[in-house]
Amino acid sequence: MRTTMQWLVVGALACGATAQEGLPQSGEVALKAKIRRSQKLMLPSEAATPVATGFHFQDGFGGDFRADIDGTALLIDADADGTLETRVEGETGFVVLTNNGRRYGVSLSSKPQWSFKAGSEVMGKIGSTKIRLIDQNHNGRFNDIGEDAMVVGNGRAASFLSEVVSIDGELRRLKVAADGSKLSYSPFVGDVGKLSLHAVTDGKVMAAVLNSKDGRYSVHLSKQDAEVLVPAGDYQLHSGVLSLAGSRVTMQKGRSKSITVAAKADQKLSWGGPAKAEFAYQENGDELVFDPNAIWFYGATNEEYRDWNPVGKSPLIVVTDKATGKVVAEARFPGSC
């Protein structure tokens, strides 16, 4: 059986643009690689990629960086010269791959198998606005729309790489070189609307990413009710992070529906409280048996909340006797998420 329990959740969101004087309508920007041994950005969808036979980046960053297992160690050809000269031992490691004077960092883990995440980014500026690009899908290319990640401005939360971004209060179309060496920008031609989010939460919105349904456009929002210019079309929530007093919870699309941003119109997406818990249980005589892993938390627009951190900081569920009002039990589910 599955039932629903409601309570109140409560928070803040979105992002704006600051005008820059003298920014050309079109231009080209050189991008510089930056090694990040400790990744502090919140990426919308990064998962570790198996190293397998190496880092085959010919179609992008360039170079074929072979790898092989030697007992429990990992051997890597870090300069693509055909020799496995770099040895990584232990549970974690960090290696900088080099090709024609350019660098690409990989953060390595041996558990449960040798895998890696991005340990670098490329960055530049359009006018005074900082642009940071991350090879989120780990294929050596930095131009995969809707798969790689980007940060526009000085924030620490990324959206997916988008064909169009808002800079200087206007939409610009981006074109990124596959090797991450440069990007060009030009005016966006098409219908434009405004998008904002209104969050009902006591917490702080650390990140919130919305994507167009076709995956071509992505926007990150983090300030309550601030409006952002976007190409007109259908958008849906992808993911987010909320924090409160040292605790965090991630937010995902769940069962929420897409919204339409019409041309020359303002569209606001409200989410957060009141929230509800849906959980499975079994009746065993006069007892109810709950599975702590079979519980789902949804917000006002059916966005889903999961990965409560630290452990045991999910909402408190109180079970009472309907006739007497006496508290029968109190619990937090899941207690080990």
Image: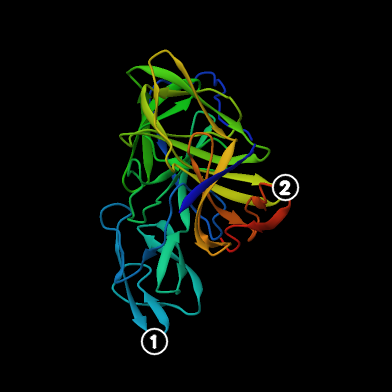
Q: Are there few (<14), some (14-19), or many (20+) residues within 10 Å of tag 2?
A: few
Describe the element under mark 2 as helix, strand or loop: loop
Foreground pick, 301 / 159: 301
The figure's colour scheme reads rainbow
Residue that sits furthest to the left in the current view:
59
Q: Is residue 255 left or right of residue 190?
A: right
Q: Earlier in the sequence, mark 1 or mark 2?
A: 1
Q: Residue at x 72, y 47 (%)?
A: 325
Q: How many marks?
A: 2
Mark seen at residue 243: none
Name the outermost residue toward the bottom.
71
Q: Which residue is mark 2?
A: 325
Residue 32 shows up from this direction: yes
Nearer to the camera, 328 or 89: 328
Query: Which amino acid does the dot numbered 1 rest on?
Result: Gly
Residue to which mark 1 is pinned:
71
Q: Residue at x 34, y 77 (%)?
A: 84
Residue 332, how many percent across, how many down? 63, 57
Residue nearer the viewer, 13 or 158: 13
Residue 206 rendering spot, x and y as whole percentages = 60, 42
Determine the image quadrant of residue 173: top left
What's the residue at 37%, 37% (across, down)?
A: 183
Name which residue type carries label 2: Gly
Q: Identify the element where label 1 is drawn.
A: loop
